[in-house]
Amino acid sequence: MVGAASVGLAVAAPAPEASAATPALTASHTHLAFHDVTLGTYAGPTDVTVTNTSSSSDKVTGYRFSGDDDFFFDSAQDQCFQVLAPGASCTLAFDFAPGALGTRTETVNVVDTAHSGLSISMTGLGTIGYYEVTSAGDILTAGDAGYYGNLSGSSLNEPIVGLTPTGDNGGYWLVASDGGIFTFGDAPFLGSAGGIALNKPIVGMAATAGRGGYWLVASDGGIFSYGDAGFYGSTGALNLNKPIVGMGATPDDRGYWLVASDGGIFAFGDAGFYGSTGTLHLNKPIVGMASTPDGRGYWLVASDGGVFAFGDAKFYGSTGNITLNQPIVGMAAMPDGGGYWFTAADGGLFSFGSAPFYGSGTGPHVGVVVGMATDGDGTFQSGTHRPAVRVARPDGLHSGVAPGTPHFAGS
C-alpha cells in the first residue's frame, strides 16, 4: 500500500548558519511525469537519487509538499532522513495515486541544513472508465477501461447477469444466472455455483479487495462466498416481500448490503443501515445499488432512472422524469464519490456529478445490456478503508482502443 503515513511530512529542524563551503543537494530528476492512472489505483515507485555534490556534509531534515496531495512516498522507511557525506547519495521513491480526474500536480521541497533549495515537481493524469455487459457476455469498454476478453459467440447454459471488475483496471469476472463464473485478465477463478442446484437464480456479485474473493447473491438473498470473502449472513431463510436484485460490499470487505426490488436494504457484517425505500410507493422497481467509497452511504436506482441517496451519498441527478427508450438495469459510482452512472437495457449511458460520459453502447449490434461497472475503486483520498492497488501500466493498455472511445469487443 502507498506510504500514506508519510504524506505531507513537512517537519524541518531549525537550520544552522551555512558554512563558508555551502553544501548543495542535487537530484537525478527534478520532474517526474507519471503515466495515466485509474482512480483507486496507484503507480510507482519512481526513484529519485539525491546526491550531496559539495565538499561538506549535509543533512536532510524534512519535506514540504504543495499541490494536489496525490503523490506519496512509496515507503516510510526510506526518505533520506540522514546526514549525507560529500559525494554520498540516498534514494527517494514516489507513487502517484490520483484523487480526482484530470491533470494532477505537486511539488516537494527538500529541506536540508544547507538550504540547497532542491525541489522535485510531479505530474500525472487521473483517469476512469466503465464497462457495459450484455446477457450474451459481450463487453463494451469506454474511457480507460481495459478490454480483456468476452464471451461473444460462446454457448452459455444461462445468461450473464453481471460484470464485476478487479478494481485495478486489470480484469473482470462475468457471472451467469446459474452461478457460473467467467474470468478475464487478472481476475482469478475461486469457485462458482454453476454445478449447484440453486433455489433461485443468481442476480449479483461483489468482490473483495486485492482480487482475493467474491460473493454471489441469489434473488432469495442466498449468499455464496469464495476465496477470502467472508460469510456474514443472508436472507435465504426469510420470506421476502420482493426479490433481491443486487448487492454491494463494504470497503474493508467485512460486510455487505443486499437490495430488493422494493428498495428494502438488508445489511450484514459491518455494513451500516442508512435507510431504504422499502416503505415507499415506488413508480418503478429498484434494479441496482452502489455504495460510497467510504462505505457510509449508498445509492439505489430504479428502472426509470429514479435515484435514492442514503447516508453520505449525495444526489447528483436522475432520469426519473425522462421518457427512456429502455429501462435502467444497473449503476456504478465514481471512485471519489462525486457522481455515478447508470445504463439502460439498450446500452444507453447516463452520467451525473463528476462521472464523465464517454459514450453509450447503443446500436443494432448491441444485445440486451444487463449491467455496468467502473474499472476503478475507491480513492485513497475519499476515506475508503480499502487499500489502493498498485499498477504499472505502459502506454497502449487499451488494446488499440483510444481512451474515451466506446467499443464493443468483437463487434
Image (cartoon, rainbow, N blue to C red):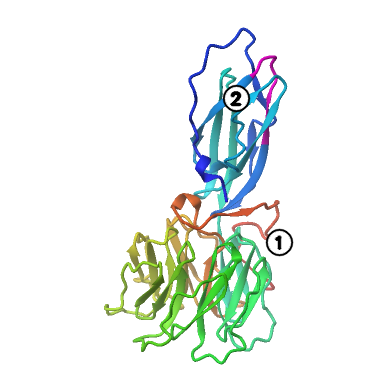
- Residue 145 lies in what quarter of the image? bottom right
The answer to the question of whether label 2 and label 1 lie on touching residues, with beta carbons closer than 8 A, is no
Q: Residue at x 45, y 65 (%)?
A: 250
Instruction: Note whether 188 is above or below 49 in the view shown.
Output: below
Q: For residue 399, which numbered disc appears in the image?
A: 1
| Cα–Cα gap, marks 2 and 1 | 40 Å
Q: Is residue 352 visible?
A: no
Q: Is 53 a magenta residue?
A: yes
Callout 2 amino acid: Leu
Q: Residues within 10 Å of mark 2 (few under 14, many from 20)?
A: some
In front: 378, or 236? 236
Residue 197 numbered tag: none
Q: Nearer the viewer, residue 330 or 60?
A: 60
For the record, the magenta segment spans 48-57
Q: Residue at x 43, y 65 (%)?
A: 291
Left or right? Give the position of 320 relative to 118. Answer: left
Residue carrying label 2: 118
